[in-house]
Image: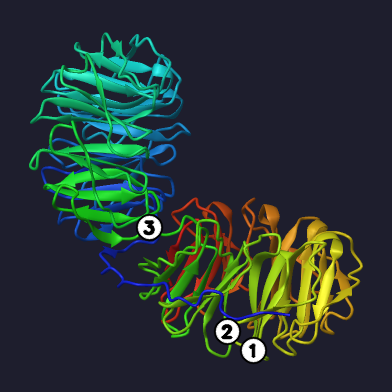
Amino acid sequence: MAWALVLSAACFAEGVPPTPVFRGRSVINASLFTGLQVHRTGTLLVGGTDGSILRSTDAGQHWVAASTMDVSQAITQIAASDSADVLMAAGPMAAMLRSTDDGRTWTLQPFGSAVRMRAVAWSARSRSWVAVGEQGVLIRAAKGDETWDMIPNPATKNLGGILALPDGTWVAAGEEGVILRSTDDGLHWQASRTGTTATVTALQYVPELRRLIGACADGRVLLSADGGRRWTRVATGVDDYLSALAYDVQHKALLAATAKGAVVRSTDAGRSWQIVPSGTSYYLQHLVYLPKQGALVASGEPGAVRRSFDGGKSWMQASVPTNDRISRLVVADGALTGLGQFGAVMRSTDAGATWQVQQQAISLYVHDVQFAADGKTLVSVGPQGSVARSTDLGRSWEPLPLGLGQDVYLLSATKDPVSGAVVAGGPPGTIIRAEGDATAWQRSLEVNSASRGYFQKMLADAKNGVLLALASPGVVMRSIDGGRTWEATDARTDPHLFDADVSSADGSFIAAGRDGVIQVSRNGGQHWDAIKSGVATHLYGVGFVRELGAFFVLGANGVILRSVDSGATWQSLDSGSNAVLRYVAYDASSKVLIATGDRGTLLRSADGGASWQQIRSGTEQALRKPVVTRKQGIMIPGRTGTVLRSVDAGATWQQMPTRTTGHLKGLLELPDDAGVLAYGDRLLLIGP
């Protein structure tokens, strides 16, 4: 029976892509959460995951990626000396980043401990730097000194904040209520009594009050009027996590944002507090004061941006054109730059009343990328019904508001060989398609049941124009009209099917799965037969190699099966491995097969799969499907930012610097010598 006709034929996409304002980035959708305007030069710097530091010299209107020496860890804080001739950034493992050219380029400065620093500050009084981080590590460097000294610390808790006071006193804070103090230029530190075991989440010195303020995870604040020697613990009326502090100079009001949307306010230097509803229950993550406009702006989860012009006594909602969490607000020349958890970057010049989107949020995970029918536009699909377009070969992306719903996970996409339409699918049984430049989409199937429509792979038979939606659990669906309508097949999905592929020679489909099951279809996916594989282990990967006229099926315990008769019979090959194998690819120029799997397993065959050699990959990370490129050899993506490359037909492999620790699922070679796009946790451009 046909599950036909378009269940929802509306075109969803609207809008015009934003003008690209970023240059030189390799990681496109880094999460950004820290920033600084260098006051002597006016340069605005923001940082985040994947070693990202972006630089703007026009208050956030245009951005250029800084060179950070292939650092892949998150940049947690950036600081400048008073003369701005030296900048420091915390975050890399066992090193600090240093710049002497206004943030254009950065060099690593190791400090001899395998931890990451979380915060760094400069003292104009002592002419020195201090950074704090994991396991209570404290390090210090004098100006002009290229080395960092480890400083003994009485506490071993993680430290996340550091301040240099005007009189030269240093104050550091961290987990379990730890506050440390130094009065000898950071050479020796003493623990202060705080009366709390709650983490100090924010630390601020307010010169107008001559007070140190510490916000805590239990909703209390810590006050000190003597440079951090003694602290008073004050209740604010809430027991929520306090996420940020700000001081409104015009209204002489001290404010703290909470994780449940409220703002607490004090007009007596923190001795007493009042709870002020902000109009939202969403997490407020950051709070800033704009002295030129006399405004307070709070940001956080989607819909949580709020503004106040009366010292925080009342708040109004700001309309923000993104669904991203704005985790940080950076002030530069009176303009606000909002930084999003999923890569959004926005700018406001009117105290947050209106915003210009410079980059929309991109899905946390990209499951697949295809070229649209026009051959120029890239389309990505992912969780929560996310679809995005790129018209500049992946350098910038435009998310499309399709309205598919939060429970829709688009796991795979393919191209209709006749119309060129992109067809994507995923649980709970959703299939969508778009022709042309992929701006207009149609929902062609909606099962609304993950148990019936867990579409994990979309396939296209280029020879016969058949599309297949592999679902397990569920019903394997088939389309013969370019994905406009779908009908059920008789493929069995119990035991579970993990993967499938199609022969480009005769259009046969092979699906494989749990307990050694193999199913074959020789009539365009309409009817399926169970075939004896000869093994009982789970089979995870299927691949057809046109040049060899053979299907290969891979699985647990090093299983590799080969069929040269469209799946009628299968031969078990000796892989020489007992690892879980999942993917296979063929390099036609060198006539070499490459198989990959878990724990960095990499196998090579130069005789059509008759024999296999285990190759050293140099990694223990799970490896995804190899891709044979035109000019960069064979490349393999994997977990924790792994990309392997071989230029000698797979005999030896090197790890490429990717500047990310995100898991990578796949690679797509770009035209016009534009390199390779990696996707997964991150969208990553790898140059030619």
Q: Residue at x 25, y 15 (%)?
A: 223
Residue 381 vertical placement versus 641 (above, below): below
Mark 1 lies on a secondary structure that is loop
Q: Amino acid at mark 3?
A: Ala
Q: Residue at x 13, y 19 (%)?
A: 209
Q: Return the residue at label 2.
A: 416
Q: Is residue 624 left or right of residue 324?
A: right
Quarter residue 291 falls in:
top left
Label located before the other in sequence (2 or 3): 3
Residue 490 vertical placement versus 27 (above, below): below
Mark 2 and 1 residues: CB-CB less than 8 Å, in contact?
yes
Give the image location of residue 467, x and y in percent: 65, 81
Task: Examine the rendering and report whether any part of residue 608 can be seen.
Answer: no
Q: Residue at x 19, y 12 (%)?
A: 225
Mark 3 and 1 residues: CB-CB less than 8 Å, in contact?
no
Label located before the other in sequence (3 or 1): 3
Quarter residue 529 falls in:
bottom right
Disc 2/disc 1 C-alpha distance (Å): 7 Å
Give the image location of residue 339, x and y in percent: 30, 49
Disc 2/disc 3 C-alpha distance (Å): 28 Å
Which quadrant does the C terminus fall into?
bottom left
Q: Return the residue at label 1.
A: 465
Mark 2 and 3 residues: CB-CB less than 8 Å, in contact?
no
Disc 3/disc 1 C-alpha distance (Å): 35 Å
Give the image location of residue 613, x and y in percent: 76, 65
Quarter residue 665 falls in:
bottom right
Residue 489 vertical placement versus 266 (above, below): below
Q: Return the residue at label 3.
A: 361
Label located before the other in sequence (2 or 1): 2
Q: Amino acid at mark 1?
A: Gly
